[in-house]
Amino acid sequence: MLLNDRIHAFSELGNFLKQFKTTGNEKINTVLKNDDFFEGMDNKIMSAHHYNGWFTVENVLFSIQQWADILTKEKLHNWVSVYNLEHNNPKTIAVIMAGNIPLVGFHDFISVLLSGHKIITKQSSNDDQLLSYLASYLVAIEPRFAEYISFTKERLTDFNAVIATGSNNTARYFDYYFGKVPNIIRQNRNSVAILTGKETESQLTSLGEDIFRYYGLGCRSVSKLMIPEGYDFDKFFKALYPYNDIINGAKYANNYDYNKAVYLMSNYKLLENGFLMLKEDESYASPIATLFYETYNSKSELTEKLELDKDKIQCIVSDNIIENSVNFGETQCPKLSDYADGIDIIKFLSKIS
């Protein structure tokens, strides 16, 4: 397959995904293979929470919409056109995926295939329904992909490189088992928001999207605030009130109650509003329903702190306080070139020989 063939197939997948929206699904007759796959995809979306209680219909559809928006011929071409991806010697890339949010491993999936390589995928049991179905659609559009895509639950063998995503603990095992082949091994990362006290109510409300989307389970979810000394949280809590319905989710509410009880028994000082707790803590990975916060005295002190901890941070939200920071409300809408851990995966894959 030529690169244009691969791009065409994924753009058709994007057209297919555009039918599934949080505002309601809409079947479009011009979408290829729609009669074979539309109803099945709808069933996958509606049943996702049976396999993972965190995968609500709204969150699954949100993830699908993000991919539908960027799987266009123009965006795909602009993304990969700067690399040399035309070759006749495809390698097999083993990809071990996380399962914290819907379709969390899709970027690795598309990266391997657009790079012209074969992929053998080992999915997390927490997210093993959606991707395999999309892969079936992709093969229906471009049958040559059948020789390039495989899924396994067994031990990985016969591969030329590895991309593995997991916790800090599993990363040590990945290093041990895959250290002798080219690899990208990702560990825990979290995202941070920098506040100055000058943010508008609209900006703070948008920040709620970065905090609560996917219940805060994504590496791009804001789990910590950096605030100036003397910051007034009243305005912050007021702006977040539109997200109060999140406490009606049983799993979230259980985590809220449990973590609150632990904090209170440990005599930790808390701020809370009935659906979110704030705890002063130097760590970045806060529990569900909790945001950590840390104070700063100056921009130079803040910059030094974030640079020192850059390997723990996925992205930073601010009103242009830090270079290359993300706008409020946009952490869960990454571009194709927003690579996890800042590692250019296409560049990595283009050099596998």
Image (spheres, rainbow, N blue to C red):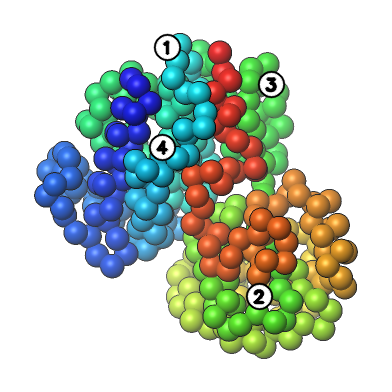
Q: Give the residue type that dot 2 points to.
A: Met
Q: Taking 243 as reference, is 199 left or right?
A: right
Res 27 → quadrant? bottom left
Residue 123 percent coordinates (x, y): 46, 35
Residue under label 1: 88
Give the numbered dot on residue 179. Answer: 3
Depth check, mark 4 against mark 1: the one in front is 4
Q: What residue sits 71% from the left and 32% below the top? A: 172
Q: Secondary structure at mark 4?
A: helix
Give the numbered dot on residue 224. Answer: none
Q: What residue sits 86% from the left and 70% below the top? A: 298
Q: Taking 48 as reference, is 95 left or right?
A: right
Identify the mark nearer the N-term, 4 or 1: 4
* Image quarter of the C terminus: top right
Whether residue 175 is visible to the viewer of this picture, yes or no, is yes
Give how far apart the Cα atoms at labels 3 and 1 are: 26 Å
Q: Sort mark 1 into few (<14), some (14-19) or many (20+) by Cα contacts within 10 Å.
A: few
In the foreground, 71 or 278: 71
Residue under label 2: 277
Identify the mark nearer the N-term, 3 or 1: 1
Q: What residue sits 67% from the left and 88% below the top? A: 234
Depth check, mark 2 against mark 1: the one in front is 1
